[in-house]
Each structure stands twice: as structure tokens, then as C-alpha cells.
Image (spheres, rainbow, N blue to C red):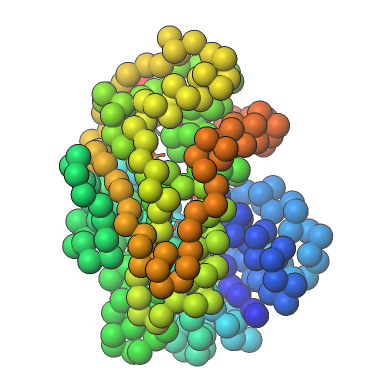
Amino acid sequence: MKLMVTGGCGFIGSNFILRMLESYPDVRIVNLDLLTYAGNLENLQDAKKYGQRHIFVRGDITDMDLVDSLLQDGPDAVINFAAESHVDRSIMDSSAFVRTNVLGTQVLLDACRRHGVKRFVQISTDEVYGSLGSEGVFTEMNPLAPNSPYAASKAAADLLVRSYHKTFGMDVLITRCSNNYGPFQFPEKLIPLMITNAVCDSRLPVYGDGLNVRDWIHVQDHCRAIDLVLRKGSSGEVYNIGAENEVPNLEIVRHILKRLEKPESLIKFVKDRPGHDRRYAMDASKLRTELGWKPRIDFQTGMDETVLWYLEHEEWWRRIKSGQYMTYYEEWYADR
Ligand code: NAD
Ligand code: TYD
């Protein structure tokens, strides 16, 4: 199988590529990634042992000529992970989000159509559904009601993908997953931010009352679900992905501090994120019943392994948490 993966140098894309190369000896992957602040070739060190089965191309998914040239020899499928992915950055400036997440998806869809690519898998998010109160879960039937510019750009992309199925009969699938955690996550997101700040005895900035709830899933369970959807999903369908693991933010932060034997006095409650979604919870029963998926990594074990991974890969995150990252950090957190 020949695949084109976009955004394969980010957190989930790199985990997916390594998993596919390891699981299927006949899989060959072209990885198109712009290497934005979030992309890191170091995430794919282990792909080197697979030689030419993984080919990295630095480039932009909005670059029509480049995408066209890469699709000349017709991969079997394109899996689109490439995105601007951080809600807080989308609040600071949403332009890159619209460009990559919306325009980039349209460029990929058109190119796939021209070159007769058999399948297109769009990696989306539960955030397109908006926010829940204390009750209920998101099913695939929920209306799209995105609240952040990030979520709005992902919802727009989902609607484009859907339209290419309805209008052109393209074989497309959309996966919507809840919050991921695990190795190689960029330390702007809650879990790696809190682990790395705690290691440095820096303040842990908790938004609002810390009681917002996210439905956490290990990145490997997410990647296994994408693999199943790619191989066995029904054309035109949306699949929710989630591990039924709702945890309030404060509980996660306390867990990390306990695990690292650091004091709770490091917690700093800060001004809330504007438009902050209160709660996400996914109903993934369609994926479970139709494709036989279930999560394998329980949260305690997954978190222990993740904390250990960040402790053992200090060079990786210390390199990131310098320079450009500090400018972002100061700009976003200074007034909070
Ligand atoms: P990430 O920010 O870690 O990685 C994004 C990757 O995309 C980076 O390697 C970056 O260089 C690349 N990229 C950005 N703009 C590009 C462009 N114009 N052209 C080519 N490459 C570009 O993101 P992630 O957390 O790995 O998320 C991957 C996908 O999964 C995203 O589409 C995101 O919306 C979705 N998702 C993420 C989560 C989560 O918890 N992280 C949950 C559900 C869905
Ligand atoms: P995040 O990792 O940004 O993911 P998302 O907003 O896409 O769900 O945030 C997860 C939760 O953690 C969310 O409720 C916001 C909260 N949060 C903080 O309290 N402090 C922080 O510094 C960050 C980055 C997030």
C-alpha cells in the first residue's frame, strides 16, 4: 500500500507513520510536512531504519503544484493530519488556521480527485461539535457548533470533505477524535506543558476554575483507530474516536505533580481562555460496533508512561522550549 501522509512530523502524524511502517512491511509512505513550529523531524528518527519506505518532503499542503507532483504516481490513500492545531494560537491569530486547515484541505481534495486517489481520510476533532454541559455525549449526528477559530477551521474542512463525497462521489472518511496524549506532543498542549513546567519548577497555568473536562485518549489508540478506518471504514462516513475517559483539567495537573513529587503550590489559576469549551465527551460506539475497535491503553498506565517519556527525552523538549517557543509563551501567558 502506498500512502501520502500530511503533517507527519507533528505529534499524531509521527506516531501514525511509525506505527504503520512497523505494522505493515508492504506500506510505503510519502510524508508531506511544512515543518512549522510544531513539526519536528526528530520525531521520525526511528523511521530511518525503514529506508525508502518513508520519504519526507518538506512542503505546504496549500501548494497545488507540489501536491500535484507528489500525487502523480497515485498513492492508494491520502491521510490528512496537517493542521494548525492549538486553540490558544488560533485566538491570537487565526489566519494560518484558515489557510492550512481550510484551503489546504481543499487543495488536497482537488488534487486527489484529479489523480484518482482511491481514499481520502480527514483527521478531525471532537471540537467541531462545540461544548457540552454536565450531561450527554457527542455522536456523529450532533450538529457542528465550533467555538474557537481552530475548531471552526476544522469544521469548515469537514464540510468540504463531505461535499466532495456528495458532489464528486469521492471516497472520503472523516475521523473525529477527542484529546490525545502520549510521546512527541508539543509542549504547548495541557499535558506536556504541565509535565515540562513541573520538571522546571515553573508555574502551572490552569485556566479558570480548572474544572473543564476533556475526554483523554492515548495517541496509539487513536492511531489504531485511524488505521482501521482507513482499511475498513465505509465511504462518506464520519467516525468518532474516544476512550470514555473524562477527566477535569485540575485532576490531571494534580496527578502530574504527584507523580513528579512536586508541590501543588506550583499551580497558578489564571485568566480563562475566551470561549473555553466546558466539556467534551465522545460516543465512539459506531467505531466500536462497526469496526470492532476498542482502546487498549488505560489512562493511569498511559499517563505514567507519558510522564516517563518526557523525563527520558528532556533534550527533545528543552530544545523546543527555547527561542520561538518562549516568545509565544510570554505573549500568551504574560497577561494571564
Ligand atoms: P501538531 O500541531 O502536533 O502537528 C501538525 C503538523 O502539521 C506539524 O508537523 C506541522 O509542521 C504540519 N503542518 C502545519 N501546517 C502545514 C502545512 N500548511 N502544510 C504541511 N504541513 C503542515 O498536530 P497534532 O496534534 O499532531 O494533530 C494532528 C491532526 O489531528 C490535526 O489535524 C488535528 O486537528 C487533529 N487532532 C488533534 C488532536 C489532539 O489532541 N492533538 C485531537 C483530535 C484531532
Ligand atoms: P489543550 O491541550 O490546549 O487542548 P484543547 O483546548 O484543544 O482541548 O487544553 C486542554 C485543556 O486544558 C483545556 O480545557 C484548556 C486547559 N489548559 C489550561 O488550563 N492551561 C493551559 O496552559 C493549557 C495549554 C490548557
**As displayed, is residue 306 above or below residue 153?**
above
- 127 vs 41, left or right, is left
Q: What residue is drawn where x is 55% and y is 61%?
A: 224
**As displayed, is residue 2 above or below residue 246?**
below
Q: What residue is drawn where x is 69% and y is 66%?
A: 23
Where residue 272 sits, quadrant-wise, is: top left
Q: How many marks?
A: 0
Query: As rendered, which of 277 and 135 lies closer to the eye?
Result: 135
Q: What residue is drawn where x is 52% and y is 43%?
A: 298
In this view of the protein, can residue 180 be seen by the observer?
yes
**As displayed, is residue 119 above or below residue 218?**
below
Q: What residue is drawn where x is 28% and y is 85%?
A: 166
Residue 19, x across and y down, in percent: 65, 60
Query: As rendered, which of 305 and 298 lies closer to the eye?
Result: 298
In this view of the protein, can residue 65 be seen by the observer?
no
Query: As rendered, which of 147 and 177 lies closer to the eye?
Result: 177
Q: Quadrant of ligand 2?
A: top left
Q: Identify the image quadrant of the N terminus.
A: bottom right
Residue 247, x across and y down, in percent: 37, 36
Where residue 302 sits, quadrant-wise, is: top right
Q: Identify the image quadrant of the C terminus.
A: top left
- 41 vs 241, left or right, is right
**As displayed, is residue 261 above or below residue 151?**
above
Residue 239, x across and y down, in percent: 37, 67
